[in-house]
Image (cartoon, rainbow, N blue to C red):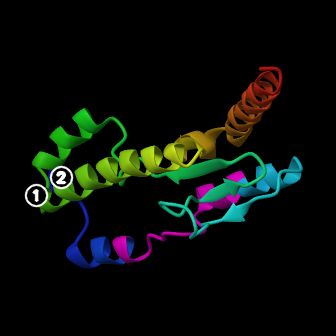
Amino acid sequence: MADVLTSEQRHKNMHNIKAKDTKIEILLRKVLWENGYRYRKNDTRLPGKPDIVLTKYKIAIFCDSEFFHGKDWDILKLRLKDSRNSDFWLKKISRNRERDEEINKQLQFLGWTVIRFWGKDISRNPYECLKVIKETIFQLEMQEAADLFR
């Protein structure tokens, strides 16, 4: 698949991609704030610097872009093989996926619950993401209550 953009256009696009305070993160944070949830942003004390951290519940939330985190990786891999600079992108996205798994394991080992949302899921229906977070909080609270009676 040939790139439809010129080198200058592609450079400009890639240069404008942010690591923090992306549109999807801001959208999800607004929904959380509106519903009374207080959070930390990009907490450097935790592995992977989660995008949103609900410290009260020990929940780490990541807002992952579909491309850089390899959503539908088998399909994306095939598309990337025909692209310019394919070796770079295949290695980069594979490593991102591995790192995501490592970070999930590290956080879980530390007693944190990890939630990962795809960017399009947040964009299309942030309140569905809020519902997932609320359900997770409910499950954690029920588990904590059950542990008290053991």
- What number is the disc on residue 78? none
* 48 vs 10, nearest the viewer: 48
* 119 vs 54, nearest the viewer: 54
Location of residue 25 by image quarter: bottom right
Q: Which residue is label 1 attached to? A: 87
Circles 1 and 2 in contact, beta carbons < 8 Å = yes
Q: Residues within 10 Å of mark 2 (few under 14, many from 20)?
A: some
The residue sitting at 32% across, 54% down in the picture is 96
Which amino acid type corresponds to the residue marked 1 in the rendered image?
Answer: Asp
User: Which element carries disc 2, helix, strand or loop?
Assistant: helix
Q: Where's residue 75, x and y in %?
A: 24, 34
The residue sitting at 13% across, 56% down in the picture is 86
Q: Is residue 134 above or below residue 82?
A: above
Give the position of the C terminus as an image quadrant.
Answer: top right
Q: Is residue 92 magenta?
A: no
Residue 115 visible = yes
Location of residue 50 by image quarter: bottom right
Residue 118 visible = no
Q: Which residue is label 2 attached to? A: 90
Q: Give the extent of the magenta segment.
A: 14-28
User: Which element carries disc 1, helix, strand or loop?
Assistant: helix
Could you tell me how far apart the alpha carbons at marks 1 and 2 are, in whole angstroms? 5 Å
The residue sitting at 47% across, 60% down in the picture is 48
Q: Where's residue 36, x and y in %?
A: 89, 50
Q: Where's residue 112, x and y in %?
A: 60, 45
Q: Residues within 10 Å of mark 1 (few under 14, many from 20)?
A: few
Q: Is residue 135 above or below residue 68?
A: above
Location of residue 131 by image quarter: top right
